[in-house]
Amino acid sequence: MTLEQTILDVARRAKVASSSLLSLSTITKNRVLIRVADLLLKEEEALQSANNKDLQLGTEKGLSAAMLDRLRLTDTVINSMVTALHELCALPDPIGKIEDFVKRPNGMLVGRMRVPLGVIAMIYESRPNVTVDAAALCLKTGNAVILRGGSEAIHSNLALAGILKKALISQGVDEDAVQVIPVTDRQAIDILLTQDELIDLVIPRGGESLIRFVAQNSRIPVLKHYKGVCHIFVDRDADLEKAVPLVINSKTHRPGVCNALEGLLIHQDVAAAYLPVLAAALAEKGVELRGCPQSTAISAQIGSASESDWGTEFLDLTLCVKVVKDFDEAKAYIQKYGSRHTETIVTENYSTAQRFLGEIDASAVMINASTRFNDGGQLGLGAEIGISTTKLHAYGPMGLEELTTRKFIVYGQGQVRE
Amino acid sequence: MTLEQTILDVARRAKVASSSLLSLSTITKNRVLIRVADLLLKEEEALQSANNKDLQLGTEKGLSAAMLDRLRLTDTVINSMVTALHELCALPDPIGKIEDFVKRPNGMLVGRMRVPLGVIAMIYESRPNVTVDAAALCLKTGNAVILRGGSEAIHSNLALAGILKKALISQGVDEDAVQVIPVTDRQAIDILLTQDELIDLVIPRGGESLIRFVAQNSRIPVLKHYKGVCHIFVDRDADLEKAVPLVINSKTHRPGVCNALEGLLIHQDVAAAYLPVLAAALAEKGVELRGCPQSTAISAQIGSASESDWGTEFLDLTLCVKVVKDFDEAKAYIQKYGSRHTETIVTENYSTAQRFLGEIDASAVMINASTRFNDGGQLGLGAEIGISTTKLHAYGPMGLEELTTRKFIVYGQGQVRE
C-alpha cells in the first residue's frame, strides 16, 4: 500500500467503527477501560521492552535528557495511566443525555441529545501516555480515534495500541475504534488533515510549531491552543496577603506549563507599597523580574524589560512586571499581550471584580485564584483532553462533554407544518 | 487603499468594535434593534430606490426572474424584517448567563459564562434581507459582524448598512459593529477568509458551490451545510393515517428548501399495502416518483430510478422511493445517501422509535413528525442564522446561543494550587 492508501484505510475503518460505537452501552465502554488498565499492568514488561527500543534509538539520535525523560514509560507513569483509567470509569457518560427538552405549541416534544463527534484525530509529540489517555477519553465518549504520536515513540505507541485493541476485542467492540498510525512519515499528517469527509475533529498537542502546522493545513476543524501568556492584575483594592501567595503559586508552582503566570500588572496606587513585598517574595523563589521603568524605580530587585519581553511565554522562572494607571490600562494590556488563556484579578472590590469577569476575554477569568487552576481536573471536568483558546465548540479545558455534540430529537404524534 | 487594505481595515475595525460590545446592556442592544425597525419603515422610499438600481442592473445583466424576485425589497419583505426585529427584541439575551455553577472542594466557585464569539463574517447570496437578519442576530449576541452579500445586491446592502449604522450611532454603539464590505470584487472573499487573527467565525449561506469554496479556502472556522437530503422511513409498524400526511407535508409544503423530503424508504412488510396509497396521494400533488424495482412492481405510479437519483437533492416535486428489508437496511441507506440534515421515522413501535433516535446520525432525528420542522423557529430557538450539518460547535439550526461561547469564571478567596 502507498502511504496515502494506508492513511485512507485507517480513516475509513475509523469511520465504520464510529458508527458501531453509537449503540455501545456505558457498561461495555467501562469494561474496556478496566481491561486496558489490567493489561497495562499484566503486560508491563513487554511494554517497557518496546519503550526501551525507543529510548535506545532516541539516545543514538541524540535526544535531550528532558525528551528521553518524557518518553520513558516508568512504573510510575504506567501506574498513573491505570489510575486515570479507573477515574475515567467513575465519571458519568455524557452520551445519550437529553437536554433542553421542551414541548412545542403543536404538542411535539423537542430535545437535544448528546452524541459522539464521530472520528477524532490526535496529533501529538513524545509522551506515549497520551496514547492511552486520548484513546480512553474518546472511547468513553463513543468516538473512534486515530492516534499519530511522535516518531521517537513509535514502538511504545504500537505496543500500547496492541493492548488497546486486545481490550476492545475482549468486549466485542470493533478494534478499529482505536488506531495508531503505523508509519512515522511526516507526510502522513498532511494526508490525514485533508480527510474532512472521514474525520470530524483534529486535536494537536505539542509545541507551537506543530500546532500552527496543523491549524494551517487542516481542512478538518481543529481545537487548539498555541500558548499560555497568563497575567495577574493586582488591583488598587487588592489584599496583599492574598496577592503574594497567588503570584508565587501562579509563577513558581510549575513554571513550564501553559497556565503558569507570565506577566504581573499592578495598579499605580499600590505599586510603591506592594511591589517591594512581591518582588522580594518572588526573588526568594529564584524568579527573575523584568519590569517597566516605573517598577524598576520602585524595587531594585526588578531589572529592565525589553520590548520583546511583553507577551512572552517564558515557561521558566522569569516574570514581566508592569505598573498600570488603572483598570482600563490593565485590560488593554491583557488584550494586546494575553493569549486568551487565563487571567486573574486580585481585588477586594466587588464592582471591579465583576467588571473583570465580564470584560476580560480569556478561556478562564478568575478573581483571587491562582492561574494554575485553569485545568480540567481543577475546574471540575474530571478529565481533560486539552485546552482550547479558540472560541468555537470549546473555550478552555476540554473534558468529556467537549468531545460530544448535540443533535435535535423530536417526538411527534403525526404533526405536519402548516 | 488596495483591496487587501480595505478588507483588513474592515476586519480590524470589527475586532475593536467587538471588544466594546462586551459591556453592552441588553436594553441598549434592543433599543438599536427597534431603531433599525423604525428606520426601515421611515426610509423605505430611499431603500427601495437603491434596490431599484440593483434590480435594473440585474435586468440588464440578464438575471433570471427568480433571482430578481429574491433581490426585490417589496413592502412585504420590509415589513417582515420589521416584524423579525421586534420578535428578536423579545427573545432572552444569552450573553452573561452563568451555567454549570459548582463549588469545588477548595471552596472556589466555578461557572461558565456565555460570551460573544467576537467577530463573525457572513458570506451570502442575493437576498438583501439577510443583511438585516444577520446583523440583528449578531448584535443581539454581542458579536461584531462583517457582511459580504452578493454583488447584484450591493446598492441595497449599502443602503441597509446605512440604516444599521444610524441605529447604532443613535444609541452610542460603535458603528463598526456592523459593516458591509463596500466592494464587490470576488477576491475580497479570499482575503477575508485568511484573517483568522481578526475573525472568529465564518457563516456562508447560499448555493453549494459558494459554501464549498468558503469551506475549502477558510483558515477561520466555518459553520455550514451543503445540502439537505432528508428521508422518511415508513416502518413496518407505521400508522398509514399518519404516514400519508407526513410524507405529503415533508415533500410538498415547500419543495425547494433544505428540509424538504428527498427520499422515501418503506419496510417490505407494508410496501404492498401502503405504497399504492402513498403513491396516489403524492401523484395527486404532482410529485414524480422514481423507485427501486420492488416499488415499481407494486405501483404503476412509480417510475424507475437511475443510480444517480439516490441521494440527490431534487429541490423539486421529485421523490426517490425504496423498499427496504428492515431497520438495518434503512439505517445503512440513510448513512450512505443522507446529508446528516433531517431524518424521520413513521412508526408506532416504541423500541424501533427509540432505536431510530439513538442510532441515526443527523442534525435532527424525528419520530412521526414532518421533516419540515427542522428549522430554528419550529424547534423553539426563536430565531435562526443558518443550519449546521457539521458537528463542531453547532449541529442543526443555529439560534442565538450558537452565536456565543462559554468562558470559565472562578470566584476565589485566595486559593492556590497545592
Image (cartoon, coloured by chain):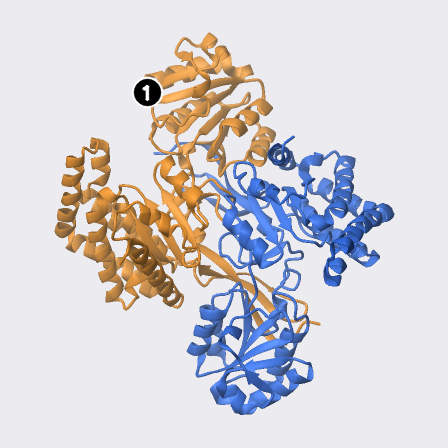
Chain colours: A blue, B orange
Residue shown at the point (40%, 43%) measured from the top left: B214
**Label 1: chain?**
B
Is residue A104 in view from this perspective? no
Q: Percent position (x, y) of residue A196?
A: 52, 39
Q: Percent position (x, y) of residue B128?
A: 25, 45
**Number of callouts:** 1
Q: Nearer the viewer, residue B380 or B294?
A: B294
How crowded is the residue under tag 1: few (<14 C-alpha within 10 Å), some, or many (20+)?
few
Q: Mark 1 points at which residue?
A: B285
Q: In which quarter of the image is the N terminus of chain A?
A: top right
Instruction: Answer with the quarter of the image where residue A209 lies.
Output: bottom right
Q: In this view, does A160 lie to the left or right of B325?
A: right
Q: Nearer the viewer, residue A344 or A145?
A: A145
Q: Is residue A407 left or right of residue B374?
A: right
Is residue A3 in view from this perspective? yes
Instruction: Answer with the quarter of the image where residue A201 lies.
Output: top right
Q: Percent position (x, y) of residue B170?
A: 23, 66
Q: Percent position (x, y) of residue B77?
A: 22, 43
Residue shown at the point (32%, 44%) measured from the top left: B124
